[in-house]
Image: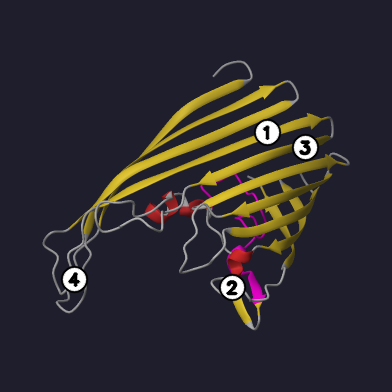
Amino acid sequence: KGKGWEAGLMTTYFRYADKRLASSSATSTANFTTAMVLDPYFKAKLGPVDLEGEAYYMSGKVNYDDARSYGNAAISDQAIKAKGLYLSGRYNMGPAYAGASFVYTSGKDPSANTTNGQDITGGMLASFGYTSDLGSDIWSDYLPNILLGADGDPIHMYIPIKGKAVSLGQSYDNLWLYNIFGGYAVTKKLSFNAKLSLAKLDKVYPAVSNSDALGTELDLRGEYKIYDSLSYNVGVAYLWTGDYYKGTQTVENVSNPYYLMHWLILKF
């Protein structure tokens, strides 16, 4: 730590041992998996400017049980490799502020041979459900979007596609996300903010979709502090849907969803 800044390095070690299946008629993929994560971060305040960033690199291996049987074909040991980056800057102007942020999390190479020691995943969530107990995002205090993110309940949001429905939920693996944002405090109790976000995939999986474009989202929010520890919030989101949600059918007519929500936050 120093005057107006701090930096650090966090490490996480994962160890997971999967049991063998008892049934002789079942397919067993018992394995012993280990991985290490290196996670440097920094925070800095330079006059009216706030800066912060975080990165991670994950490396490990899945060692399959040589004694597995029950009709399961041989599976070679597999590697785990993942990386990500988060950067954010904010300029404070009295009761107003403006800024931008960026998120990258790696995706799995769809052309990789996953049975001969190649990457089995591109992201930490796919490997270990990393921070899944804190929400769908890697950085638990980073809530980038109402629809394409962990703020709100995206798992229950769907995009209409000619009588079908496609879930909006997007975990923070395999992602590029760009945000610009701003806000204004009308009084000590009442404030508003807005955010415009562009999201796309890092890797495209041809069996799922022909496009990497998730879409562009506009979020508008208002917050009223009833008490110091209790606030009432209103949020409106609109998504200009990307072609990713068309799947492999390029002629699909994809609608643009919108979302209106309100909620209470109690801090203690």
Residue 81 in the image, given as x and y percentages of width and height: 36, 46
Mark 2: give few (<14), some (14-19) or many (20+) Cα within 10 Å: some
Q: Nearer the viewer, residue 199 or 131?
A: 199
CA separation in Å, label 2 and label 1: 33 Å
User: Extreme bottom residue here?
Assistant: 163
Is 80 located above or below residue 164 in the figure? above
Q: Secondary structure at mark 2?
A: strand
Q: Quadrant of the C terminus?
A: top right
Residue 194 in the image, given as x and y percentages of width and height: 78, 48
CA separation in Å, label 3 and label 4: 56 Å
CA separation in Å, label 1 and label 4: 51 Å
Is residue 152 found left or right of 16 in the rendered image? right
Q: Which label was assigned to residue 98? A: 3
Q: Secondary structure at mark 4?
A: loop
User: Extreme right residue here?
Assistant: 186
Q: Quadrant of residue 101?
A: top right
